[in-house]
Image (tube, helix red, strand yellow):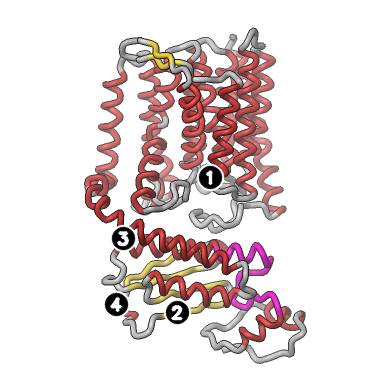
Amino acid sequence: MSYFHPLLCIVLGFATCWWLIPIIRRRALLGGDARRAGQFHHAHKSPVPRLGGIALAMAFVVVAAASLILAPSAGGTGRNCVVTVLGSLAMFGLGLWDDFRSLGGKVKLLGQILIASGIYFGGIQIELFKNPLTNTPLELGVFGYVATVLWLVTLTNVINLIDGIDGLAGGIGFMLMCLLAHVGMGVDLAFPTLLAAGVAAALLGFLYYNFPPAKIYMGDGGAYLIGSLIGILSILNSHKGSVAAALLAPMFALALPLLDVGLAIGRRVLKGLPIFRPDRKHIHHQLLDFGFSRERAVLVLYMISFFCLFLAFGVFWSQGRMLPLLLGFLVLAFVVAGRSCGFIREWFALGTRLAKSLALRRETRYALTLGQWLEMEAERRDSVFGLWQDYQFVVKKLGFSEVKLELPDGANTWSATGCDTSQLRRSRHELNGGAVVEFAADATVLPGKLFELLAELAAETWHKAASRWQELNQLPLNFASVTSPEALMHQRKITRPYAPTDTDWWTRVQRLGLPSAPTPS
């Protein structure tokens, strides 16, 4: 394989992605598909398209076609090339579907398992594990299916879970593709090498638009495509090299996101939250909370990932013989980084958190149950103000002393009877669509950690219920929004501390055929 072939794939991947992203972004913004609704955990409040994965998928198809032409396969490897392309595109399709309409964590996991199973039965399999220290091969047999599916599903979700700050998933994906291209050259596999090089170039073009402040996201579609492709190419490379080069090296390069995912799962288990529930407690979110700008936080994570990538190259070059030494360096680096950022204190407090986890889990289950009830009530309520009244019941049951909800047309406040509002602990959450919800509670009723957890769950509860109401009724999320003349008449009888400023409010009154009336006070 000459150097002209990978260079051509690099140019094709970069040019395709660079050319398509502005077109996709412009059409997404004009078509109103800038972002999927109902994402409580997203930090961006202004519309940012999440369809960048389409450009990555098109670049992937172009590079794959060029790779098949430049490196025609012989024998059974041609089947592997087809399975690689179809399996990666199937993962992309699943993620893209979720970008347009949320599928839920369980449905996505089932889809990923089915696609990974298809890849396994298509011939791309982890068949043996070679001990890098003794060079002793171990046939996996039927457990090879479990190992293959687990490997593909894990890498697919790892890339998706770290896609929470501008430029992070794209940058780490670029580093992994460079590693896989190098490994492919080392084991003399043309198709994986060309494909990895071309996709790395496509990710580089994507990063121009995704680096903070991001103009476009890769979305679940792009993350699933890159994650599954990393898993597939590493398995293909293992067929001609040692498992250290093909599997252990990518694991070292992915050490940071793997650690982040492990901490996220442990955190959610301790709190009794669903494992697939997104949150804003990842490592990159912690850096933002420490006062880092988005650009600086991404650069810090790039430096850590580059160090992990260097160790991954060391694993490959030594064929795994230096694995214990490199693993020790990796653990030491994470301990030093965690101590400098203040994470170590939380790790050492794990025993205390375990003791408190049972109480937290009970409170979490109660809050989630109330949230499900309010979301079902949103399907029955004919006004946003009526939904707000139901929400008051939820926050009262959770133990809050005061809640203030701000919508584009005004604000409403609920306070518990007899509480001293000057001595309350407070928390503020800004939601999509201009909504803001503020919580206050007595520290003796809701201590620090419990207050933070319940405030986050209560804010998400309102967000989900309000989004559901808006989705069903196709009306603006204002206190004055109603779906029937009866609801409007009932609402006008209720005294509430807000003054509508939405000029469309009285237009709706006239359209419903009701007489004009003074502005409610």
User: Which mark is drawn over residue 106?
Assistant: 1
Disc 1 or disc 4, which is closer to the eye? 1
Between 393 and 418, the residue placed more toward the observer is 393
Query: Residue 153 appears at what percent x and percent y?
Result: 50, 33
Residue at (26% x, 43% y) in the render: 340
Asked whether disc 2 touches disc 3, contact meaning CB atoms under 8 Å apart, the reply is: no
Examine the rendering and report whether any part of residue 430 can be seen: no
Q: Where is residue 201, by image quadrant?
A: top right
- The disc, 2 or 4, on the residue closer to the chain's N-terminal end is 2
Q: Secondary structure at mark 4?
A: helix
- What's the residue type where badge 2 is placed? Trp
Q: Which residue is mark 4?
A: 423
User: Which mark is drawn over residue 414?
Assistant: 2
Examine the rendering and report whether any part of residue 294 can be seen: yes
- The disc, 1 or 2, on the residue closer to the chain's N-terminal end is 1
For label 2, the crowd category at 10 Å Cα-Cα, with few meaning under 14, some 14 to 19 and many 20 or more, is some
